[in-house]
Image: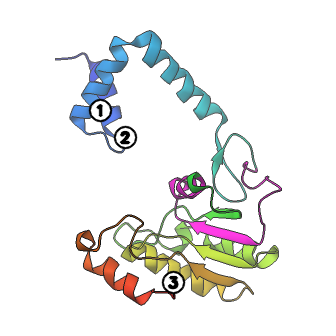
Amino acid sequence: MAGAEIDRLMQMLARLPGLGPRSARRTALHLLKRRDTALEPLLAALTEVRDRVRSCSVCGNLDTRDPCAVCSDPRRDPGLLCVVADVDDLWALERTRAFPGRYHVLGGVLSALDGIGPEDLSVASLVSRAASQDVAEVILALSATVDGQTTAHYVADRLRECSVRISGLAHGVPIGGELDYLDDGTLSQALRARRPV
């Protein structure tokens, strides 16, 4: 139906998260029909991102400067260090504007099925940061999946040699959540993590 170039564009778009073959085809058609208003600005943005965005040498965040805006912000509390699996988790926490400290991106979670071991994550640099800086508390903000919790336990064990408080995110009933719609694991965790009112 389409030339090799268009077919390649659709294949590349289909590799993006959240886009399947049909969504990739619609996106490719949209870009091609609106070259001046959609395709050209997208190409310019992609080129700029490719040329300017780097991984922060301190925390692992993505930014155009190194250290990143979070690490170089003097208003941030250096005593609080939040450990996340990936940059998208860091960005999600930043959207809340609720965390005043700094971050450390592990670069994933331990996963035997995917062949990701401790040496594939930035745990050693985390331990070094926690031991050498004025870090008072490390918050393990890892997912409630088996791999996320395995990683949290591993990281907590590695941090025991540092004199820092180790905490984790609360799990349980989400704000606005109705009990009837929650899974058994979430309800069980909510009961175990109950607090005085």
In the image, residue 45 lies at what x, y percent?
55, 26
Q: Say which quarter of the image contains residue 125.
A: bottom right
Q: How many marks?
A: 3
Q: Is residue 78 left or right of residue 94?
A: right
Q: Amino acid at mark 3?
A: His
* Mark closest to the chain's N terminus, 3 or 1: 1
Q: Which residues are magenta?
A: 67-94
In the image, residue 62 lies at what x, y percent?
62, 47
Taking depth in this image into account, of 36 and 47 the one nearest to the observer is: 36
Picture residue at 72% right of the left edge, 49% below the top = 68
- The disc at residue 16 is 2
In the image, residue 188 lies at what x, y percent?
33, 85
Q: Say which quarter of the image contains residue 7.
A: top left
Q: Distance of mark 3 from mark 2, alpha carbons?
A: 31 Å
- Residue on which disc 3 sits: 153
Q: Distance of mark 1 from mark 2, alpha carbons?
A: 9 Å
Taking depth in this image into account, of 81 and 147 the one nearest to the observer is: 81
Asked if residue 178 is positioned above or below residue 16 in the image, the reply reads below
Picture residue at 67% right of the left edge, 71% below the top = 126
Q: Amino acid at mark 2?
A: Leu
Q: Nearer the viewer, mark 1 or mark 2?
A: 2
* Mark closest to the chain's N terminus, 1 or 2: 1
What is the secondary structure assignment of the residue under circle 2?
Answer: loop
Asked if residue 197 is positioned above or below residue 6 in the image, the reply reads below
Asked if residue 22 is positioned above or below residue 71 in the image, the reply reads above
Q: Residues within 10 Å of mark 1 (few under 14, many from 20)?
A: some
Q: Distance of mark 3 from mark 1, alpha carbons?
A: 39 Å
Q: Is residue 131 left or right of residue 95?
A: right
- Residue on which disc 1 sits: 11
In the image, residue 57 lies at what x, y percent?
71, 55
What is the secondary structure assignment of the residue under circle 1?
Answer: helix
